[in-house]
């Protein structure tokens, strides 16, 4: 009987060691990940880092408690099957909170939400500045697409609009001159949307500032028509209207208007029905 010596090549020995070492590294890495994740979840869930204070600045018409209620409703949610609560300062969904406030409160023009360590949400808002009331009480609502526009929006005849042309709240019909009124023939006034073209709204705001000194009277309303979208009919307290093109040089138009009122219309102004300033230096007007 002969003795045999088995020779194991060095490569196989090293390969076995490398495989065992790799396995240990994988197990160690997985264990470390689990420890890190578990530790992170524990930190996120610590009471010290749960949002306890909601500070709201910039409110004038909206109650702070209304904002807090909406934010608290959002914070009841969670990530990862309930393991990570939204109420944690680290996990609070800032964009969701911002979008919720903007959607629920059309009166708010801007909202900024910031986390403040260790447990506060600081919310700063800018409310819209009311320009007047937009009404379409003479419009044909049968022209509204009821499959696109909610039924409740069809019934809105008047809404408060801000200086940016956004309708932010339904409004009652009004009489008199205390609030500026904008008339439109649009069949729908959708709350929270741009109901007056931004360029037109900027022109209207300029007109409200610059026109009264020229005509020596206040402005009580405006009329906007869809088929002539670049024109605005300005209604003065003296019961005559002025037609202005949105894209014209307003200062030049008002200079022409001042000349016409003084040198051509003069004392007949009390019988004035309208003045049309859409054609540069060529002005048309009508007396009653």
Image: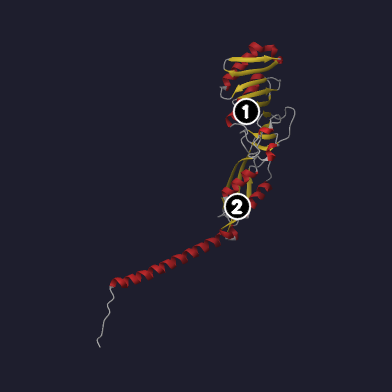
* Nearest-to-viewer mark from 1 and 2: 1
Q: Is residue 19 left or right of residue 6?
A: right
Q: Mark 2 packing: few (<14 Cα in 10 Å), some, or many (20+)?
A: some
Q: Mark 1 packing: few (<14 Cα in 10 Å), some, or many (20+)?
A: few
- List the residue tagged with mark 1: 226
Residue 17 appears in view: yes
Instruction: Residue 113: give x, y in percent of width and height.
Output: 58, 47
> On the image, which quarter does residue 279 sit in?
top right
For mark 2, give the secondary structure: strand
> On the image, which quarter does residue 223 sit in?
top right
> Which quarter of the figure is the C terminus placed in?
top right
Name the foreground residue: 141 vs 66.
141
As drawn, the residue found furthest toward the right would be 175
- Image disc number at residue 100: none
Q: Mark 2 and mark 1 in contact (Cβ < 8 Å)? A: no
Name the foreground residue: 221 vs 67.
221
> Which quarter of the figure is the N terminus placed in?
bottom left
Q: How many marks?
A: 2
- List the residue tagged with mark 2: 120
Instruction: Residue 106: give x, y in percent of width and height.
Output: 64, 40
Instruction: Residue 177: give x, y in percent of width and height.
Output: 72, 27
As drawn, the residue found furthest toward the left would be 2
> On the image, which quarter does residue 144 sit in?
top right
Residue 135 appears in view: no
State the separation of the CA atoms marked 1 and 2. 48 Å
Instruction: Residue 229: give x, y in percent of width and height.
Output: 60, 27
Residue at 60 percent of width and 44 percent of height: 124
For mark 1, give the secondary structure: helix
Task: Decide which of tag 1 and tag 2 comes sooner along the chain.
Answer: 2
Q: Considering only vertical position in the picture, is 98 above or below 167?
A: below
Q: Considering only vertical position in the picture, is 88 above or below 167?
A: below
**What sort of colour scheme is used for the picture?**
secondary structure
């Amino acid at each position: 009987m002969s003795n045999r010596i088995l020779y194991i090549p060095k490569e196989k020995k090293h390969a076995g060691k490398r495989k065992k070492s790799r396995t240990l590294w994988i197990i160690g890495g997985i264990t470390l990940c689990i420890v890190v994740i578990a530790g992170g979840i524990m930190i996120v869930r610590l009471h010290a880092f749960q949002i306890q204070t909601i500070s709201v600045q910039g409110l004038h018409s909206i109650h702070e408690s209304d904002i807090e209620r909406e934010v608290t409703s959002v914070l009841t949610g969670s990530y990862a099957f309930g393991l990570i609560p939204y109420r944690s300062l680290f996990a609070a969904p800032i964009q969701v909170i911002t979008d919720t406030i903007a959607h629920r409160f059309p009166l708010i023009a801007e909202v900024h939400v910031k986390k403040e360590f260790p447990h506060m949400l600081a919310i700063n808002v800018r409310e819209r500045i009311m320009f007047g009331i937009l009404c379409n009480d003479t419009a044909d609502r049968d022209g509204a697409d009821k499959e696109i526009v909610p039924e409740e929006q069809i019934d809105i005849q008047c809404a408060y609009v801000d200086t940016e042309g956004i309708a932010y709240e339904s409004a009652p019909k009004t009489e008199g001159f205390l609030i500026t009124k904008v008339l439109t023939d649009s069949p729908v006034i959708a709350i929270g949307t741009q109901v007056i073209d931004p360029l037109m709204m900027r022109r209207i705001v300029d007109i409200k500032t610059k026109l009264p000194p020229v005509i020596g009277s206040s402005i009580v309303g405006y009329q906007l028509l869809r088929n002539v979208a670049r024109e605005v009919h300005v209604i003065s307290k003296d019961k005559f209207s002025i037609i202005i093109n949105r894209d014209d040089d307003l200062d030049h138009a008002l200079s022409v208007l001042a000349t016409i009122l003084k040198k051509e219309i003069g004392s007949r102004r009390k019988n004035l029905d309208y003045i049309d300033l859409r054609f540069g230096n060529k002005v048309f007007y009508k007396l009653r």
